[in-house]
Image (cartoon, rainbow, N blue to C red):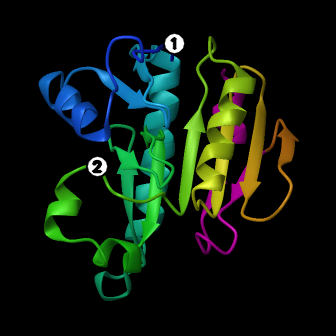
Amino acid sequence: MNFQTIDLSSVITLTREDFVKLCAANPDMKLERTAKGELIVMSPTGGETGSFNSDLNYDLVAWNRSYPISKTIGKTFDSSTGFSLPNGSDRSPDAAWISLAKWESLTSEQRRGFLPLCPDFLIELLSPSDSWKQGEVKMQEYMDNGCLLGWLIAPKLKRVAIYRKGQPVEILDNPKILSGENVLPNFVLEIGNMLAWS
């Protein structure tokens, strides 16, 4: 996904409230906001990246729904969901999950808007034109804001970076599977087939 970062500071201070209004007025655009108030405008993804992202979300939702309703442990979110992070930025990971306890702690109003928290688990999927370095910076921001487990996936490079709270980043080249570890119990993503066609 190509993106442009626009520094509006010489013209306006883009507050979180302004950003929410901007998103509401432009629902067909994918926008994010940095902690410094910079606007990030992203283009739509290409076919391969969109298909890969759809598969990732499907697998995450299928795992989450494998628990009986009475034992549901969390909520899943797609790439159009906004998260207002504690550091002041507003981000939309490609796939995300939060514990049911976090979800139930939110008011009805909070659930309808950008969620005022950081996901417990998330995935950022790089398109062929995305920078690995920029992906790393974004992932570190999520970790600094409370994410427990995150995957940065670069199909073009056949590489995955695994981010775990309080641990060094682990880089895997051409992995076959990824584990949800203790954050997503029994979640296993068979990524080898997905990376094979990229």
Q: Residue at x 52, y 19 (%)?
A: 48
Q: Identity of the amino acid at label 1?
A: Asn
Residue under pointer 2: 114
Disc number placed over residue 2 in the picture, else none: 1
Give the vertical position of 3 relative to 197 (above or below).
above
> Can you tell which quarter of the image residue 6 is in?
top left
* Residue 1, x across and y down, in percent: 51, 18
Q: Are marks 2 and 1 in contact (CB under 8 Å)?
A: no
Asked whether residue 143 is in view, the answer is: yes
- Is residue 182 highlighted in magenta? yes
> Could you tell whether 35 is left or right of 179 in the image?
left
Give the vertical position of 194 relative to 182 (above or below).
above
Q: Residue at x 35, y 82 (%)?
A: 68
Q: From the image, which quarter does the C terminus lie in?
A: top right
* Residue 172, x across and y down, in percent: 85, 42
- Is residue 167 highlighted in magenta? no
53 or 195, which is in the foreground? 53
> Can you tell which quarter of the image residue 185 is in?
bottom right
Q: Which residues are magenta?
A: 176-198
- Secondary structure of the residue carrying numbered label 1: loop
Give the vertical position of 144 relative to 64 (above or below).
above
58 or 87, which is in the foreground? 87
* Residue that sits furthest to the bottom in the current view: 70
